Amino acid sequence: MSNYVSGGQKRDKAAAKRERSLMGAIKRGESEGRLLVLAEKLREAKLQACRARRSEHSTSTEKWQSITPQEILKKYRRKCERRAAADAEDAAAEP
């Protein structure tokens, strides 16, 4: 059973993959409609991951149930902007 991966870990990986997909789409400047679809898919993946670990993260489940795709998109756009700013600072600091 050394190769066994629990359902929670699988769902965590799926959620991380959805998160990377959304971030990449934001960076590529994809259409608003496509971004909203990806945000909804991320929301569903996060909910599944939270439900897989029922007792640990009931507040996380409530958070992801109540958040809209527009709010998710806004949050991840800010995250992309912060990463871009940090990358620019790093590039400027290199000799």
Image (cartoon, rainbow, N blue to C red):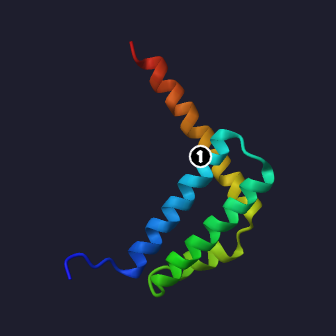
Is 50 situated left or right of 40 in this image? left
Counting from the top left corner in percent of width and height, residue 76 is at: 64, 51
Is 45 situated left or right of 72 in this image? left
Picture quadrant where residue 70 is located: bottom right
What residue is rendered at 54% in x and 39% in y?
83
* Residue reaching furthest to the left: 2
Q: Secondary structure at mark 1?
A: helix
Give the answer, above or below, for where 23 lies relative to 85. below
Picture quadrant where residue 82 is located: top right
Give the answer, above or below, for where 95 lies relative to 23. above
Residue holding disc 1: 24
What residue is rendered at 52% in x and 83% in y?
51
Closer to the camera, 95 or 59? 95
Counting from the top left corner in percent of width and height, residue 54 is at: 48, 86
What residue is rendered at 55% in x and 78% in y?
48
The disc labelled 1 sits on which kind of residue? Gly
Counting from the top left corner in percent of width and height, residue 80 is at: 60, 43
Give the answer, above or below, for where 29 lies relative to 70. above
* Residue reaching furthest to the bottom: 55
Counting from the top left corner in percent of width and height, residue 6 is at: 35, 80
For disc 1, the neighbor class at 10 Å (few under 14, some 14 to 19, many from 20) is: few
What residue is rendered at 42% in x and 78% in y?
8
Give the answer, above or below, for where 26 lies relative to 4. above
* Residue reaching furthest to the top: 95
- The quadrant of the rendering that contains the C terminus is top left
Closer to the camera, 56 or 10? 10
- The quadrant of the rendering that contains the N terminus is bottom left
